[in-house]
Every structure is written in structure tokens, then in C-alpha cells.
Amino acid sequence: MPAEMVELRGHIIDSLTLAKVLDLIITRGAEYTVAEIDIGKTQSDPSRVLLEVSSDDPELLHSLLIDLHSQGANRLLTQEAALEPCAQDGVLPEGFYSTTNLPTKVLVSGKWLDVEYPEMDCAIVIDSSSLNSRDTPQATAVPMHKVHTGDMVVVGDRGVVVEPISESHESASFHFMSSQASSEKPKRLIVAKVAERIMVTRQLTPPGDVLAVCGPAAIHTGAGQSLARLIRDGWITMLFAGNGFATHDLESNILGTSLGVSLREGNQTESGHSNHLRVINEIRKLGSIQKAVEQGYLKSGVLYECVVKGVPYVLGGSLRDDGPLPDVITDVVQATDQMRELRANVNLAIMLATTLHAIAVGNILSSKVETFCVDINQAVVTKLSDRGSHQTVGIVTDVGLFISELADILSP
């Protein structure tokens, strides 16, 4: 029966990586034998498992090994990575290796290279200028649209090693129940732990960035001022959002409404349905959000604090945006590329009531970025993890209450 040895290393027990790998083998109709196993004795000790995976169907075994590799189960026998050049801008060679967001190494010219900025659904490009020199080659995860003719791309999974997701003891402490997303978890304790992780991130040397990815509900629920406070006090250092969030942040701080509903009284104001359009129109007249701050039209709010504190933000557009605001990047590929340019120092990300932005940003973040997804809808917080961001901890709760309590802890 065709068989191959695969190896898992790291914190594969507490992260449930080993359980997922074994379940995948059985589900696909293959077989496994545990050839060697060495389980770490403490929470900080890594474990190692050597598995022989077999199937009487060679094609099934081949496809299974590819899927196991994406979970961090690496073939024991490694060879130099195969490289092929791109024949056309924006087009990858056949059989290119498709990346995960897990830490990845590739064997080139006898050296194991760390792949820079690992993210999902990219190719690994090797700096061709150093291949024929004594310089150490550089390996980078590059999205399809950014490859150029002649770029050397890794083809197949030989010579590629993926490190299984490593769940820290601190992150593991969030998992009070068997599921990572549950509406029955103690919210006050969870918010306190998120606050603790943010404090740890900001106390690093140098301080790590804390990214907030926000949907309009963060404003609709009345938490805008709390979010602004977190930015003003330096706890949130980067913001990704869309036209809707930005529009209602501006509307709420200029006219006191969000979608025409008074945030003070909770009732629909007369002709309030057009308030956001009037604000957008005025910002467009002024030229940008920054100019609105400089000219005194915008005097408070999340984006006001971003401008005043110099906190970078990216507003990515969508199909049904009103206006949009002049700061919104309507080319979504360009918006994602701008997010990529800012992600290098992000250590922690909080996704606040936004499905599409959360998944999009999750796709470009390394698995080493601590990620918390907050939404009242349990399907949203599980969807992010289902799409490959396995490091995500889901918190099912009202986003307004979550942000307000987080601000009360960090910025009392």
C-alpha cells in the first residue's frame, strides 16, 4: 500500500492540531500508524509525532498529503524546493505552492529560508537576484496579482515546511468550553483578558501594534466614543474599516445621529435618513477627513482621534457605498495592498462586528497575530476561523457593550 511519513512538531496537543490531522486522515478514507511520539511534559515543551500515512489509492494519498501539509504535517523526506519562473505578469506557473498563514520555511540552495509575511492563498517568490550569488536568497509570500514575469516561484510542496499553529497558554485560557465561540462564556472575564493581552502587546519592546477592524455596528450601538478613547490613549494603534463605519462615525459626531437615529435619545430624527449623505457631501467638498479636522468641521470621534494621533487607517470600499467618502479606496485590491503595507508590526487584532472586513483582513495576517472576533452573531465569529484564521478566538456578545467595557478597563 502506498505510504509516506509525515512529522508534526510544536504545541500540537493543546492546539488540537494532532487531533485535526488524525481526523482528516480517517475522514478521507486513509490509514495512519504512529511511528514515534514524544509529548512535552510541561506547557512550554513542544511535542513531536511521526505518522505513517497510507492509502491504496495513490491519488487520494497525494491530495491528502497536500491537505495535511497545510495543517503543519510535513513530509519527513525533504528535497530542495522546485522553482519555476512566471511567464506573464500576474500569472503563476502551473502547480504553484499555495500558502497558508502559518509560519513557513522553504529549502533553497541548501538553506532553509523563512517565508516573509506568511498569508493565505499566495505564492512563495524567491528573490532571483541572489540565487546565483553568495547572498542568502529571500523568500516572500506574494499575492497573484503582484508577481512579475521572471519571478521565481515555488512549485509543489517539496522543500516546504509549515509550522503547526502554536497556541500560547494565555490564548488557551480563553477556551473555557469546548467551542471557541459560545454565547454562554463569561463576558466580563473575557473582556478583562482581552484588555490584558492588549496591555502586554503595547508593553513589548518596541511596542506592538493593536489593529481594530470595525463595522458600522460599533457606531450604531453607541460605542464610538469609547473606541475613540482607546485610540486617544494609545491602546489601538491602527484601524481598518469601510465606508459605512467611517460615514456613521462622522455623522454621529457632527449631527449626533447614526443612520438618522439619535444616539442620545434613541429615536429617529426628522429627515434623519439623509443625514449620512449630507455629511459625506460636506466631507467631499472639503476634500478629505483630515481637512475636515483641520478646518474644524470634525471635532471628535474615532477618525478625528486617528487624524490627531497620527494613527494610520485604511478605508476599503464595497459595491453599495454611498458617496463614497474621499478617503475610501474604491479599488479593493489596492485597499488590501495598503493594508499589507501596514501589517508588519501588528501583534494583536480585534475584529468588531464586521464579517467581510474581518475575513479579508484575517486572510492577510500571520497565524502568530493574536486575533479576537467580536460579534452578536455566532456564525460570524466561527466563519473567520473556518476560512483559515485558526488562531481566532470568537466572542459572541453585543459589540457596543464589549467596546465600552474594554475602554473602561484600559482608559478609565
Image (tube, helix red, strand yellow):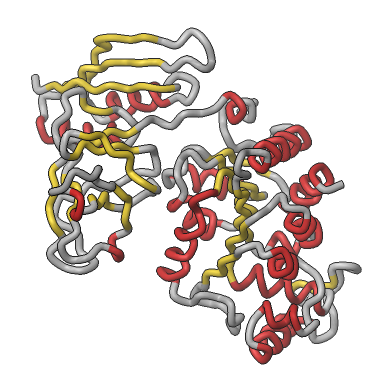
Question: Is residue 190 toward the left or the right of residue 77 in the image?
Answer: right
- Residue drawn at the location 60% of the way across and 52% of the way down: 211
Left-right relation of 383 to 278: left
| Residue 270 % position (x, y) | 84, 84
Is residue 270 shown left or right of residue 369? right
Residue depicted at x 40% and y 68%: 333
Residue 210 at what x, y percent from top left? 62, 49
**Where is 293 relative to 87, above or below?**
below
Residue 291 in the image: above or below residue 167: below
Q: The N terminus is located in which quarter?
A: top left
Up-down relation of residue 286 to residue 303 (above or below): below
Which picture quadrant has residue 61? top left
Q: Quadrant of residue 173?
A: top right
User: Residue 379: in sight, yes or no?
Assistant: no
Tell me the residue at 27%/33% (across/down): 161
Q: Residue at x 41, y 10 (%)?
A: 39
List x then y, in percent, for residue 221.
77, 60
Residue closer to the observer: 399 or 246: 246
Residue reaching furthest bottom?
Answer: 285
Depth check: 382 or 42 in front?
A: 42
